[in-house]
Structure formats: C-alpha cells, structure tokens
Image (tube, rainbow, N blue to C red):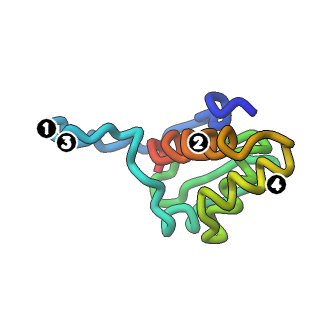
Amino acid sequence: MNDSNSINHISEQKPRQKKNVQTNEDESTTPVNQERLKQLAVSETGFIFDPQSGQSFSVNQTGHLVIDMLKRSESPQAAAQELAVRCEKPYELTLCAVEAFMMQLARYL
C-alpha cells in the first residue's frame, strides 16, 4: 500500500484559491469535508471528478476503497480496519495510511 501514489492529479480546469498565508494552518491537515466527498463522481476504475471545482484525478484500488467507505459515512478508523483485514496488514499501519490519504485528498477538495 503506497499512499503517496494513491492520488494522481489528471487535470485542473479551475485554479484553486490560495489559503490565507497568515494562518499557521497547514493545508495538508485540513479534514476532508463529508459533503464534498458525497458530491464526487467516482468510476469503477478510480477516475474521480469533482463537479464543484471541475478537477479530475485518479486513485488506485486502495484509494478507491477508502473514498467509497468515506462516502458511505464510515469513519477513517472503519476504513483502516477494513484495509487491515483485506491487505493483511497491522491496523496501526493502515490507519496511518488512511489518515495520510485523507490529508492528501483534502488538498484537492
């Protein structure tokens, strides 16, 4: 499971707005908005389109599973537990990967 390659940005049709530079908030730690997740159009192959921003990107099978679970309002912990079982990896490792994936995903949403 390689979370650094779980999102591959394909195109950006609309420029993103810059964050307020005066805040100390790191944009990578912004939580994923549940309502934004539900708006995403996700194909079976992992191609994702965000109708709000016009951005599209793709995710691998692991990222697709995590997005699907999060769209169903499952917690990051539940997604990590499912990954731990499916991938036969320790829960702590999959939880860390899910959290890193969510931080990366939040940068796109």
Q: Secondary structure at mark 3?
A: loop
Between residue 11 and residue 27, name the one nearer to us. Answer: 27
Query: What residue is shown with label 2?
Result: 101
Q: Is residue 79 left or right of residue 13?
A: right
C-beta proximity under 8 Å, tags 3 and 1: yes
Mark 1: amino acid: Gln
Query: What residue is shown with label 1?
Result: 22
Mark 4: amino acid: Glu
Structural crowding at the residue carrying mark 4, measured as other residues with C-alpha within 10 Å and reported as few (<14), some (14–19) or many (≥20)? few
Q: Secondary structure at mark 1?
A: loop
Mark in front: 4 vs 3: 3
Residue 81 percent coordinates (x, y): 73, 55
The CA span between labels 1 and 2 is: 26 Å
Mark in front: 2 vs 3: 2
The CA span between labels 1 and 4 is: 40 Å
Residue 20 percent coordinates (x, y): 19, 42
The CA span between labels 4 and 3 is: 36 Å
Numbered badge on residue 44: 4
Q: Earlier in the sequence, mark 1 or mark 2?
A: 1
Structural crowding at the residue carrying mark 2, measured as other residues with C-alpha within 10 Å and reported as few (<14), some (14–19) or many (≥20)? many
Which quadrant holds residue 15? top left
Between residue 96 and residue 52, name the one nearer to us. Answer: 96
Mark 2: amino acid: Phe
